[in-house]
Amino acid sequence: MSLKLAELKRNIYNSRYIIMDMLSKRGYKVDNYSSFNETEINTLFEQLNSKVSTSADIGPLDIIVERTLQNGDKDKCFIKYRLDEKFKKSKSLEQQILSIYNEHLDNNDTLIILNISKVPFKQHKKDSNIESFIDDILSKHKLFIQVYGIDNFLFDVSKHYTVPEHEIIYKDEIETVKAKYNVKHLSNLPTIRREDPQAKFIGAKPGQICKISRSSESNIHSVIYRLVVN
């Protein structure tokens, strides 16, 4: 076994902790996936092949979880272990995404494509070919996808002491915010990009409202609200 392969296996196993934490914070039930040990994850990795990773088939490492929303509706999140070295925009990737939604997901569900290399946050959206691809999928097919690398999940930035808490708020709280701050249209709120690391971590979709809470050492608690945009 090469050192590179051994390192990839180790990273896949280590990343599962943060992936499970991310899904839990989004409200998904992860009990069926959270108890695998390193040997079991390595065995699942050995069962993975390129045909499965590039198709709509549910692969050995793939994750499908469900949650119940505040309004009682349910939705799902599918994490597809494609494991390309880097993101590559292609017609075959687009077709795989469409096939996954056709076979396993509804249009309001979330699909996460998981590669190996870290997906960086670009300060300027125009510099990111990944954001361009995601925008294209959303525009053409009304589907919400995210692209991550295994390397994104080797450190949980959401738990860093400098990072404020981010959460999505829904109808009742939105109406309270509009009344409290005299906001007639949500478009008047300051914005946060969907690909902002924390907005992305909680699965924020364009049009949703993100509540950002920050506490200081002097116990001053501040809250701001931002409209999630493409």
Image (cartoon, grey):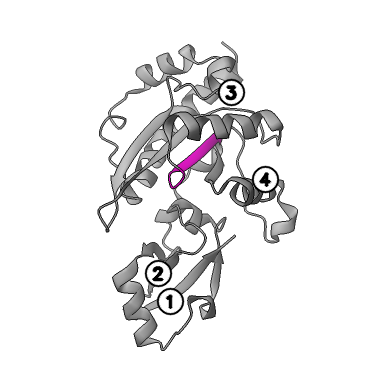
Which contiguous range is marked in magenta?
107-115
Q: What amino acid is at disc 4?
A: Phe
State the residue position of label 4. Answer: 133
Task: Report if residue 156 is visible in the image.
Answer: yes
C-alpha distance separating marks 3 and 4: 17 Å
Measure the C-alpha gap from mark 1 to mark 4: 30 Å
Please name the residue that numbered disc 1 is placed on.
224
Q: In the image, 97: left or right of 182?
A: right
Q: Left or right? Give the position of 62 relative to 229.
A: left
**As shown in the figure, which amino acid type bears the numbered disc 2?**
Lys
Instruction: Compare residues 178 and 223 and report the one nearer the observer.
Output: 178
Is residue 149 a member of the stretch shown in magenta? no
Q: Nearer the viewer, mark 1 or mark 4?
A: 4
Residue under label 3: 54
Q: Position of residue 44 (x, y in %)?
A: 42, 17
The number of numbered discs placed on residues in the rendered structure image is: 4
The mark closer to the camera, 2 or 3, is 3
**Quadrant of res 174:** bottom left
Q: Quadrant of the C terminus?
A: bottom right
Q: Amino acid at mark 3?
A: Thr
Q: How far is mark 1 from mark 3, CA to CA?
A: 41 Å
Do tag 2 and tag 1 residues touch (Cβ < 8 Å)? yes
Sequence-first tag of 1 and 3: 3
Where's residue 216, x and y in %? 38, 75
Above or below 16: residue 121 = below
